[in-house]
Amino acid sequence: MKLGYLTPLSLESIATARRLGYDAIEAGAGWLTGSTLAEIEADLPRLRDALQEHGVAVTAVAIYGGTLDAPVAEAVAYWGRAMAVAKALGCHVVAGLTGRDNSLTVDDNLPLFRERFGPIARRAEDEGVRLALEPWPGGVQGHGPYRWTNLASTPELWDRLFTEVPSPALGLEYDPSHLAWQGIDYLRAILDYGDRIHHVHAKDIVIDRARLARVGVHGQGWWRFVVPGLGEVDWLGALRHLRLVGYAGDMAFEHEDRVYLNERWEEGLCLGLRFLRSLVAAY
């Protein structure tokens, strides 16, 4: 298992990953509506050379934004371009979000999902690429207005998505932090969906249960993301469960700990690496 962290892909980020001691990066390729992917495509030869020079791998190419918000042809083409970039960079995983039309029910979003991710998944099968949907619900706290940005946020919805698009290429970017605050058993999820886990995000969480008891699940400020090892995720248990289901992919630290921002950003990356390396060494 290679250890990386999620970062925009650039010559500088590749060099930084090696300097900090990471094996890899999860290559952030921006939003569907942005120009980052085109910039990566234009600079692919230099990026490949830099990866080889520094001995850094790519665990996944990550694209963000609402796939369901985009016209079908545009969404399918964009994911196809991301697959081509991933293969050019030596990896076979593209991670992202489904998107969601907030004016519609989940039931009415499912046809939108099927008409986009059906052809996206078929393309992935043809290309030998796996698709990893991150279980981030979106901005759904603070008593509203809520902005759901993803259908793939709970096991119940995973089942519905996999029924709509029954392709083995379609799977998950497992992230226990998103499941923990929703009250979902994140270890059980590994056992139940092991064959669908195509990439892993390492992100921890602290839950303030005293505040939760006061503000309720719809309130704000009762949980926050932290560096792996500083929160309550059972990482040893998670890795043990991943081994049980035969997970053979990689892991990327998604750094969203607000204590370690700005001038402390690299400090947070190093803390996470030190903690995860000790566990992954025995994986």
Image (cartoon, rainbow, N blue to C red):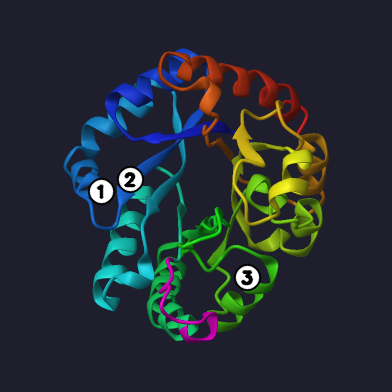
The foreground one among 154 and 90 is 154
> Considering the image in quadrants, where does the C terminus appear?
top right
Mark earlier in primary sequence (3, 2): 2
Tag 1 and tag 2, C-beta contact below 8 Å: yes
Amino acid at the residue labelled 3 = Trp
Q: Is residue 248 visible?
A: no
The foreground one among 224 and 7 is 224
At 46% from the left edge and 81% from the top edge, which residue is drawn? 109
Element type at mark 2: strand
Instruction: Give me the C-alpha separation between circle 1 and circle 2.
Output: 5 Å
Q: Main secondary structure of the magenta part?
A: loop
> Considering the image in quadrants, where does the N terminus appear?
top right
Q: Is residue 266 above or below residue 176?
A: above
Amino acid at the residue labelled 1 = Leu
- Residue 110 is situated, as x and y percent measured from the top left of the image, at 49, 82
Mark earlier in primary sequence (1, 3): 1
The residue pinned by badge 3 equals: 158
- Residue 244 is situated, as x and y percent measured from the top left of the image, at 82, 50
Tag 1 and tag 3, C-beta contact below 8 Å: no
Mark identifier at residue 225 = none
At 78% from the left edge and 48% from the top edge, which residue is drawn? 213
- In magenta, the rendered stretch is 99-108
The residue pinned by badge 1 equals: 37
Query: Label 1 neighbourhood size at 10 Å, few (<14), some (14-19), many (20+)?
Result: many
Number of the front mark, 1 or 3: 3
